[in-house]
Image: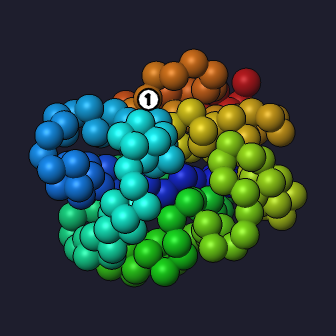
Amino acid sequence: MNILWDFDGTLFNTYPAYTEILYEILDQAVPKKDIHNHLKISFTHAVQYYGLSKEQVKRLFAMEQTIDPADTTPFPFVEDILKFADLNVIMTHKPRKDVEHILKYYDFEDYFTEIVAIDDGYPRKPDPASYIYLHHKYKIDLVIGDREIDIVPAKSIGIKTCLFQNSAPGADVYLSAYEKFFDLTCIAIND
């Protein structure tokens, strides 16, 4: 099975660290749960929803650079799936150096054949251009993401999808925890 992964909130639990940063930028005036929910839609959505200024966004990016990889842990059992897959690739809006830094910290870099990051010049999801590139190159069987914008491009080009910790309509498979992957996903992919 060849899997295309989203990064933030799918492979690694990065949202708590991002929530803390945005909480600080918003002067601790917004509940963390609300911030988390808006970040789960998309970073762009959260910036627009909270009306962040260019200076606040610049500060957010600067603070993001100080996050310790120890605060962005891989989800339980995700490594089992990475080992199981024939091939893993990543498509993320995160800068490549940040992705590589976290992968190296957890000794995960050898699990991935290719990383398409925001600095590679592809349009942001849900535009399917990066997915088309990766699918043509690797014949992707499954896309795993935690947000609707992660599965929309896959659906548009006929790839099976899995939403992780998200019940938005449209996915082929829904997982609340990766230990259930082998029970649910293999059945849905073979349909």
Q: Residues within 10 Å of mark 1 (few under 14, many from 20)?
A: some
Q: Foreground residue, 11 or 152?
A: 152
Residue 46 horizontal side relative to residue 88, left or right? left
Residue 115 horizontal side relative to residue 64, left or right? right
The quadrant in which the C terminus is found is: top right
Give above or below for 110 relative to 79.
below
Q: Foreground residue, 162 or 186?
A: 162
Q: x, y percentage for residue 189?
A: 68, 33
Q: x, y percentage for residue 148?
A: 56, 33
Q: x, y percentage for residue 53?
A: 39, 55
Query: Which residue is at the far left?
Result: 28
Q: x, y percentage for residue 169?
A: 57, 18
* Residue beneath the point at 50% across and 47% down: 44
Residue 157 horizontal side relative to residue 53, left or right? right
Q: Is residue 147 visible?
A: yes
* Residue beneath the point at 54% across and 76% down: 96
Q: Which secondary structure, mark 1?
A: loop
Type of amino acid at the residue the image marks with label 1: Asn
- Residue with the mark numbered 1: 166
Q: Is residue 79 visible?
A: no
Give above or below for 93 relative to 148.
below
Query: Which residue is at the far top?
Result: 169
